[in-house]
Amino acid sequence: MARIACLGWGSLIWRPKDLRVESPWFEDGPSVQVEFLRQSSDGRITLVLDESAVSVRSLWARMRTESIDEAIGSLRAREETLIRNIGIWQTGNRCPRLIGGLPVWAENHDITAVIWTNLGRKFEKQKAPATAEQVIAHLKSLKGEPLKKAAEYIRRAPCQVNTAYRQKIIETLGWITPASDESQSED
């Protein structure tokens, strides 16, 4: 039987919805190159894998599924995306270029397959990644519910996902990460 893990660095951690994970989110996942580079339809700027990003430590949870296809389906449904937007690694495959040391990490954790959300950067119609200044200008332009959702996403991203853009957003906008899990309870 496959021992499958799901990697996370954003809202999967605090809002897994129906994602079929059987364990808590562990903080010792493999290094991932992620940054706040994807502009969502609701105005949030979300974390995505990108070659321009510096590596941070991901989080991971064991999947409560019988097969890799079932795990992929669970993550696809939670993310409301297409299967092509789900990253997959299995024992024997090469290391994904933006997830450093994944094969060694998986072996050390007795994991035979790993899945993750694999959406790319998107900001207006740019081909190049948005700069931190562009992201901050966008966030400053938000009002009402879009502003609330954008601030929540940045504040609730795991503390260890302390990217360069996040640091600049905190410095500029004062969106500090809550100090405890109690302050992150869902309403």
Image (cartoon, helix red, strand yellow):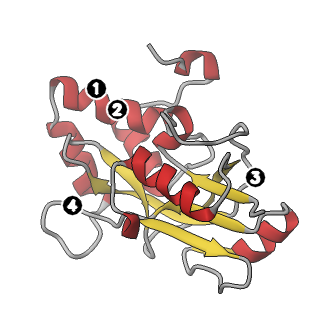
x%, y% of residue 119? Answer: 37, 63
Mark toward the start of the polypeptide (3 vs 1)? 3
- Of the residues tagged 2 and 3, which is closer to the observer? 3
Q: Nearer the viewer, residue 141 or 57?
A: 57
- Is disc 2 in contact with disc 1, using a CB cutoff of under 8 Å? yes
Question: With 74 as the anchor, is 149 left or right in this view?
Answer: left
- Is disc 3 in contact with disc 4, using a CB cutoff of under 8 Å? no
Q: Hey, what amino acid is under mark 2?
A: Ala
Inter-mark Cα distance, 2 to 3: 25 Å
Inter-mark Cα distance, 2 to 1: 5 Å
x%, y% of residue 174? Answer: 39, 31
User: What residue lies at 68% left-to-right and 55% top-to-bottom?
Assistant: 66
Inter-mark Cα distance, 1 to 4: 19 Å
**Residue under numbered circle 1:** 148
x%, y% of residue 14? Answer: 53, 33
Q: Hey, what amino acid is under mark 3?
A: Asp
- Is disc 2 in contact with disc 4, using a CB cutoff of under 8 Å? no
